[in-house]
Image (cartoon, rainbow, N blue to C red):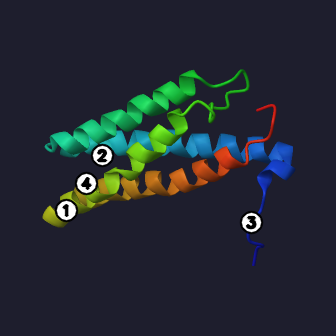
Amino acid sequence: MSEDGVNLSKIRGDWKFHMDYLQNAFEQTLKREASSWAVLGGDAVIATNVQAQQDLWAELKASANDAGTINTTDGKTEEFIVTCRASKSLCDAYEDGDSSAEVEEFAETCRQTRALCDDLAMMKEQRPDGF
């Protein structure tokens, strides 16, 4: 269906378009994650992780260039990705202990955030000069 290894840095305009799309996806998913967690609460470790994701995302947005593109060269991107991925074992354990619809919704937003991290890592690697 599609070729492996599409290098978006070869298509400068598309890289910015995809990065804007990805940033919006993170923004919306992190809002849902925080909102969902606010309904649940209870686990201090998960609460700390959710807050760390929110704080790091705010730092990334604050360091965005004039075009609104987050900085992927200062190490914060890696820290953000690591923090998001650390939620896997936390959310899995939480979901194993409670299979309610609210917990499932929260766990799904965590999965979506982690999945977006794969795209962010790719976009970071393929960032063209000048962005």
Type of amino acid under label 2:
Ser
Which amino acid type is marked by label 3? Gly
Quarter of the image with the N terminus is bottom right
Q: Which quarter shows the C terminus?
A: top right
Distance between mark 4 and mark 2 Cα atoms:
15 Å
Q: Are marks 3 and 1 in contact (CB under 8 Å)?
A: no
Judged from the image, the secondary structure of the residue bearing numbered disc 2 is helix
**Is residue 41 among what the camera can see?**
no
Q: Cβ–Cβ below 8 Å for labels 3 and 2? A: no
Q: Residues within 10 Å of mark 3 (few under 14, many from 20)?
A: few
Packing grade of label 2 (10 A; few <14, some 14-19, many >=20) is some
**Between marks 3 and 2, how big is the CA–CA gap?**
35 Å
- Label 1 SS: loop
Sequence-wise first label, 2 or 1: 2
Name the element at disc 4: helix
Q: Residues within 10 Å of mark 4 (few under 14, many from 20)?
A: some
Q: Amino acid at mark 1?
A: Ser
Residue 14: image tag? none
* Residue named by callout 3: 5
Give coordinates of residue 88: x percent, y percent: 33, 57
Residue at image mark 2: 36
Q: Which residue lies at the image location 43% right of the left edge and 46% below the top edge?
A: 82
Sequence-wise, the earlier of marks 3 and 2 is 3
Write down the quadrant of residue 95 in the picture.
Answer: bottom left
Q: Position of residue 103 (x, y in %)?
A: 24, 57
- Residue 90, label in figure: 4
**Which residue corresponds to mark 1?**
100
Q: Nearer the viewer, mark 1 or mark 4?
A: 4
Question: Mark 3: which secondary structure?
Answer: loop
